[in-house]
Image: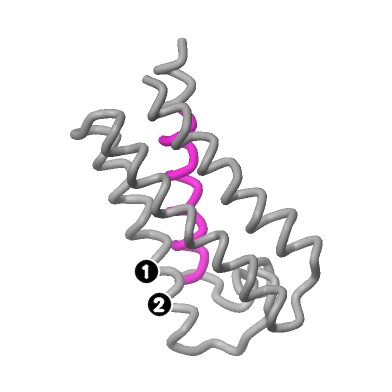
Amino acid sequence: MLNVIAYGLAIVLNLFIIVVGIRFFAVPQAAAAGYGVPAQPNAYLTVKGLRDTSYGILGLALVAFADARAVALFMLVVALAPLGDTAIVLRHGGTRAVAFGIHFATAVVVLVDAALLFAI
């Protein structure tokens, strides 16, 4: 049962970040506003979209082809991104609700999944 929960959560989290990344390509203004710091279309938004999409694809590849420890290590490292996003939103005038309710909460869920994967 722990396998199903840990891998299921890893798959959902990676699919979610792919959707976030694609959203930055498709509707950069709305995606930036949802991120918590409105921005004009620029290279940053494309880079963010590419980063998120790449993380999600790599995560899914690890789920498909690697063991639980490799996926857990990936999730542990990738949790740095939403932790950094929390600081970015707070530093650049975003709301605490978005910083902690979206970015920090995401980091916590990713870290929980890493712990579950390490437990397998």
Q: Quadrant of residue 4?
A: top left
- Hey, what amino acid is under mark 1? Leu
Measured from the top left, where is residue 14 in percent x and y? Answer: 42, 45
Name above or below for residue 39 compared with residue 14.
below
**Residue on which disc 1 sits:** 50
* Discs 1, 2 touching: Cβ within 8 Å: yes
Residue 7, visible in the rendered structure = no
Residue closest to the far left: 65
* Secondary structure of residue under mark 1: helix
| Magenta range | 7-24
Task: Based on the picture, tell me whether residue 18 belongs to the magenta stretch.
Answer: yes
Expressed as whole percent of the image width and height from the top left, the position of residue 78 reads 42, 54
Residue identifier under label 2: 47
Residue 4 numbered tag: none
Give the x, y percent position of residue 3.
40, 17
Residue drawn at the location 38% of the way across and 51% of the way down: 56
Residue at the image position 55 percent from the left and 59 percent from the top: 82
Locate the C terminus and report the quarter of the image it occupies: top left
Q: How is the image coloured?
A: one colour
Amino acid residing under circle 2: Val
Instruction: Please state which of residues 24 and 13 is positioned toward the viewer in this rendering.
Output: 13
Across and down, in percent, residue 52 comes to 42, 61
